[in-house]
Amino acid sequence: MPANRFNGFTEYGVGIGLRIPHYQHILEKKPVVDWFEIISENFMVDGGRPLQVLDQILEQYRVVQHGVSMYFGSFEPLNPEHLKRLKTLVKRTKTPWLSDHLCWGSVDGTYSHDLLPMPYTFEAARKTAEKIRQVRDFVEVPVCVENVSSYAEFHVSEMTEWEFLTEVSEQADCGILFDVNNIYVSSRNHSFDPMDYVNNIPHHRVAQIHIAGHSRYEKYILDTHDHPVIDPVWKLYERAIELIGPTATLLEWDDRIPSFDEVHNEALKAKQYIPAPAPRIETRSEVFA
Amino acid sequence: MNLDQIQRAMFHAVRQPLTPGERMRAKALDGTSLRETAGQIIKPNDRLTSFERLEIYNRQYWFRIISSMCDDFDGLRAILGDKQFHGLVIAYLTEHPSTSFTLRNLGSKLETWLRDHLEYVAGLEDLSLDMVKLEWAEVEVFDGPSLPKVTAEELTQMGPDPLLQLQPYIRLLKLTAPVHDLLLKLRDRRRNDDAPVRKLPSRSLPKAQKTYLAVHRLENSVYFKDLCPDAFAMLSALQKECTVSEAIEAPEWSGRSEEEISAAVRNNFANWASLGWFCKPSTE
């Protein structure tokens, strides 16, 4: 049973990000993996090896798309070329949902290639929600918005980050990709209690959870996706699962990527927090079918 | 400040080149005070000032795009050495920031820009331009579109003087030196050595020698194929949508007998067909 109306894929289990250093291992050894998340932009190309590998992966595995540069929160309009290519990829992967970040990153068609933080204002929430709806209407699959790690806060903010996430997702009527590592990183950088965040989002909208590692510097933490998940992040994950129910979970590891097995084993630690499905009561007809 | 104003102010700051010590500069290139910008839009906290918080994004921006250029133009980096290469990349990206949703296209204007800014490659102009052409061609060939190959049977049914289209991913390059050999050597070395990139000594650089090259794809791996000038002329003509007979007339063929020309044409076309270079014309 789906845990909520945005989460029709609770049986998806625990996946990992599909990354180049693991291609050979995956294609040759065909390890059992619940699902892979791909970075959409890496496959929004016209041909060649990226699409060949993707097609081979699609033959064997479930794939979900995750974007990094739609920039729902940018003031400027959506990029039509980006949308067109995204839709072409959606048709190829048949992704059951897709996600991108609650951030901005472009001005006048110039791209930062970074996930820049939003000012938490009602104006920004309205504008962002409008663009999420536009993307969903164009690509015709459910869209989830992911909370990002941030290193700056704006004077103009009118609410907390979790209130902003709630405001945007309610106005857009979209799902949430809930990144518990990002919550931890931002909580350290902005001195708030991460459990307040986990406890106060609209849990019924969470369709997917991200877990990851990060790097600690003297005065701040950077979301680098280059370490194992730390215990305080697992605690946030545990609480999130308690509140949301079993949810498709994905480990991100993007830099200094270790072996496939190391990444996969790190991801599988999530399973200990996900309650086993209730035993199915067999009816007589099923027993004899 | 509204959303538009905040984003413009922050992006203007984030895009400013870093100081030589890789810190955020106090003043933007246009003279705007970045301390004031930071103070106006970003809250300080108990550990970092507004300026320092904005600086995290400024540094991330440059580290990310420079790293992407290092990946795509590793050969140019070796010719120039890290310091000169970084200077060039910063100047280029300051003038041509990304206008694409993907970092893949970051170097698309580098060759054109470099032709107008040869001071960044003084003394190494031709080699640098050759390498940029080659490395950008690789990017394009790697994931460029392909069309269905023409089969041998289809070839025979195409009439006496068909229009043969080359696969759209193929790039034909006329270079002043065999920089592809240098690039392949560098990659071999890199496989066994993770050391930082040092400027190559001039004795390691290829000598001037007219080079004709096809950058192409076979089973989705990118390859460099040396061409003779005649083959280059024929392929260039085909790429310009000339008919086969027009393409055959494109080389000078001086001092060659009819038999030699026929044999060269036959061998070349057979070789190109076997590499899957001919495709059915696009209907678009």
Image: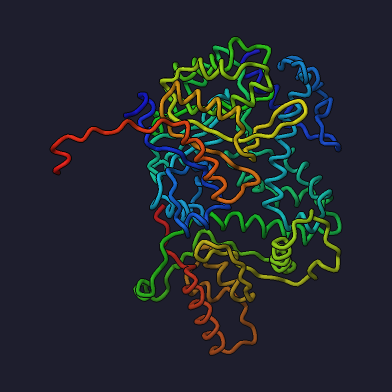
- Specify the farthest residue to the top: A158
Quadrant holding the N terminus of chain B: top right
Residue drawn at (50%, 82%), measured in percent from left and top? B266
Residue drawn at (42%, 43%), measured in percent from left and top? A34
Residue drawn at (80%, 70%), measured in percent from left and top? B207
State the image coordinates of residue A80 (x, y, percent, origin top left).
49, 35
Nearest the eye: B261 or B122 = B122
Residue drawn at (47%, 34%), measured in percent from left and top? A272
State the image coordinates of residue B8 (x, y, percent, origin top left).
67, 23
State the image coordinates of residue A101 (x, y, percent, origin top left).
54, 29
Nearest the eye: A151 or A112 = A151
Q: Specify the quadrant of the image occupied by residue B229.
A: bottom right
Image side of residue A104 versus residue B124, left or right: left
Nearest the eye: A14 or A56 = A14
Q: Is residue A142 above or below residue B44?
A: below
Nearest the eye: B16 or B66 = B66
Q: Is residue B157 above or below residue B7?
A: below
Q: Specify the quadrant of the image occupied by residue A159.
A: top right
Image side of residue B34 versus residue B264, left or right: right
State the image coordinates of residue A4 (x, y, percent, origin top left).
37, 24
Q: Is residue B224 visible?
A: yes
Q: Is residue B112 visible?
A: no
